[in-house]
Amino acid sequence: MIVRGENGRVLLGDTLRQRGADVTYVPVYRRQCPQIDRNVVVQRLTHPRGPDILVFTSPEALSNLFELVPDGAIRQQLRSAQVVVVSEAMVKQAQNMEFGPPLRAIADEAGLMRTLTRWAQRLHPHKPPTLPT
């Protein structure tokens, strides 16, 4: 049994079937863009210099952001931010969306914190990192 989102990927199931497994999918959630006010999203993303870094832990989050943000200056401002992603597929997706070179993090809290800390240290090499306790 593979628990996944509606219309999820089939590679794992197909591979297991080829190896003789009986595979059943159980879709337990939907991947869709939230129904929220686009103006609220734009307002939160825009300030004089824009966000420094954007962290995405799912391909849908990356796609949904651009669906919610109008084309033009705001998208360009977002593209100038450092992007952190958690898979090789998301690296390619971010590149296709014309972000700069994304940072790849391990998809857990510790991996994300390491990646963010290293990024901050490169940005401010003489300032010691402060991590939450």
Image (cartoon, grey):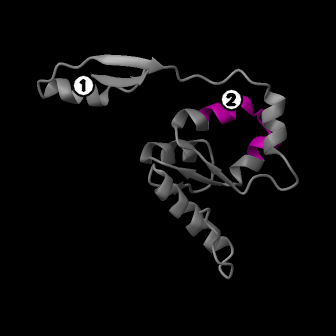
Q: Main secondary structure of the magenta part?
A: helix
Report which residue position mark 2 lands on. 67
Q: Quadrant of residue 44?
A: top right
Dot 2: element: helix
Does 79 sit above or below residue 61?
Answer: below
Quarter of the picture holding the N terminus? top left
Residue 33 is left or right of residue 85, and the answer is: right
Residue 21 is left or right of residue 122, and the answer is: left
Q: Amino acid at mark 2?
A: Glu
- Residue displayed at 60% across by 38% down: 62
Q: Residues within 10 Å of mark 1 (few under 14, many from 20)?
A: few
Check residue 129 for magenta coloring.
no
Q: N-terminal of the two: label 1 or label 2?
A: 1
- Residue 105: x and y, percent? 48, 55
Check residue 70 for magenta coloring.
yes
- Residue 130: x and y, percent? 64, 70
Residue 52, which numbered label?
Answer: none
- Residue displayed at 63% across by 46% down: 98
* Range shown magenta: 63-76
Does 42 sit above or below residue 49?
Answer: above
| Foreground residue among 75 and 53 | 53
Q: Amino acid at mark 1?
A: Asp
Q: Residue furthest right?
A: 48
- Residue displayed at 80% across by 39% down: 72
- Residue displayed at 48% across by 58% down: 110
Q: Residues within 10 Å of mark 2 (few under 14, many from 20)?
A: few
Can residue 67 be seen in this snapshot?
yes
- Residue 112: x and y, percent? 52, 55
Does 66 sit above or below residue 96?
Answer: above
Report which residue position mark 1 lands on. 14
- Residue 102: x and y, percent? 56, 55
